[in-house]
Amino acid sequence: MGTKDGDEPNAERRGAGMLSQISTEMVRLQKQFYGCGPERAKSYMLDDLLFIVMRGGVLAAEQTMLDSGQEDLVGNFRQQFENVMGARIIAMVEQFTGRKILNYQSQVVFNPDVVIEMFIFDDELGADRVRDTAEGQLSEESVGEVRGEDVEVPDADDQ
């Protein structure tokens, strides 16, 4: 994988489009396996790093626990969930980027409710992909960001 000839993801997955697809699929995975997805998610890529920032999406039961001072308990559950989901998440990101992930970490914080997924790749982006990604981030529209309400989860029968 990586940036060798023939291994490049197709043009629709490069730059801004790739970041939006990663954000969309991350929201879909959260909705499908957690039962609730973030209100919005945005992906950022630079060199050998990818960050997916997800905002909102606390379950009612989690909010009840947070309101009673159980932030550590909710955080621990969320971390365990991410550990279970790790292989699926890594496979998804590798598929969309065409790059091998060396390390993946997840961090959840409350107030504000933010989850940050961090990936380290085994290589840096080639110059053309850096340009595609930078141009996407600098455009006037919000690139790499999706709203949770716009992401559908397939029915169990469709999977």
Image (spheres, rainbow, N blue to C red):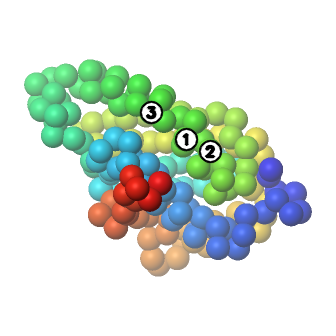
Which residue occupies 27% across, 27% down?
A: 74
Q: Which amino acid, mark 2?
A: Ala
Which residue occupies 40% across, 31% down?
A: 81
Q: Residues within 10 Å of mark 1 (few under 14, many from 20)?
A: few
Q: Nearer the viewer, mark 3 or mark 2?
A: 2
Helix, strand or loop under label 2: helix
On screen, residue 15 versus residue 112, left or right, reads right
* C-alpha separation, residue under disc 3 versus residue under disc 2: 14 Å
Q: Which amino acid, mark 3?
A: Glu
- 153 or 82, which is in the foreground? 153
Q: Position of residue 151 (x, y in %)?
A: 37, 63
Q: Which residue is mark 2?
A: 91
Q: Which amino acid, mark 1?
A: Arg
Mark nearer the N terminus (3 vs 1):
3
Quarter occupied by residue 72 = top left
Whether 68 is drawn above or below 18: the answer is above
Q: Which residue is mark 3?
A: 82
Quarter occupied by residue 100 = top right
On screen, residue 9 versus residue 63, left or right, reads right
Instruction: Tell me if I can see residue 132 in this picture.
Output: no
Q: Position of residue 120 (x, y in %)?
A: 65, 40
Asked if disc 1 and disc 2 are in contact, CB closer than 8 Å, the reply is yes
Q: Position of residue 10 (x, y in %)?
A: 72, 69
Q: Which residue is mark 1?
A: 88
Instruction: Tell me if I can see residue 128 in this picture.
Output: yes
* C-alpha separation, residue under disc 1 versus residue under disc 2: 5 Å
Which residue occupies 34% across, 41% down?
A: 34
Q: Residue furthest front?
A: 157
